[in-house]
Amino acid sequence: MIALREINRDNFDDVINLSVLDGQANFVASNVYSLAQAKAQPECVPLAIYRDNDPIGFVMYGMDFEDKEYWIYRIMIDKKHQNMGYGREAMRCVLSELAQDTGHNKAYISFRPENAGAKRLYEKLGFVPDGRIIDGEVVYCLHYASDQQNKNLRDSKE
């Protein structure tokens, strides 16, 4: 079972010690950097991804200061826990949290074009390119309140 939990003094070290595979290091900022960013940008919500009682990843989302839309700024699954469906499940948890805000119905995410794994995951969840490239990353958008999106989220459990 995957759950998102607040990062606090009890799990801080566990979260900053999570890491991706060497070949993925250019795809996501370190958790230390992300936690510092969240301190400086209080609109960011950093969370630990847990499988049962084990921290296995990190995610950070927030209402973007400039465009007033939700962005999923980071998602990473520790190298020891990849390719087990945890990233997809964690994304579903994040989208469920975002859906609580009925005043919004879309989320953005960006990633390096060469990150084929991220592209595959996000497209499977229903994200589509919105045509922008920001800081060398392609931007994808998800309209998560639609009936089709809810179906995509259920179907992505495979």
Image (cartoon, grey):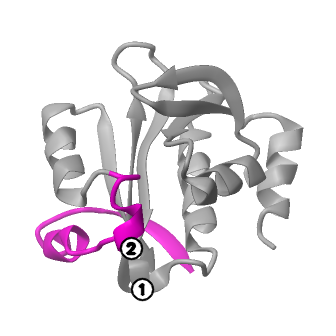
The picture places residue 34, in percent across and down from the top left corner, at 24, 48
Taking the image as shown, residue 151 lies to the left or right of residue 95, namely: right
| Quadrant into which the N terminus falls | bottom right
* Local crowd size for mark 1, using a 10 Å CA cut-off: few (<14), some (14–19), many (≥20): few
User: Compared with residue 67, is residue 118 higher up or lower down, i.e. above or below?
Assistant: below
The residue that appears at 39% across and 75% down in the rendered structure is: 78
Specify start and end residues of the magenta stretch as a single range.
Answer: 1-28
The residue that appears at 55% across and 40% down in the rendered structure is: 98
The residue closer to the viewer here, 27 or 8, is: 27
The residue that appears at 19% across and 68% down in the rendered structure is: 16
Q: Residue furthest top?
A: 66
**Helix, strand or loop for disc 2:** loop
The residue that mark 2 highlights is 21
User: Compared with residue 124, is residue 12 higher up or lower down, i.e. above or below?
Assistant: below
The picture places residue 52, in percent across and down from the top left corner, at 46, 85
The picture places residue 96, in percent across and down from the top left corner, at 61, 50
- Amino acid type at image mark 1: Lys
* Residue 101 visible: no
* Local crowd size for mark 2, using a 10 Å CA cut-off: few (<14), some (14–19), many (≥20): few
| Quadrant into which the C terminus falls | bottom right
The residue that mark 1 highlights is 80
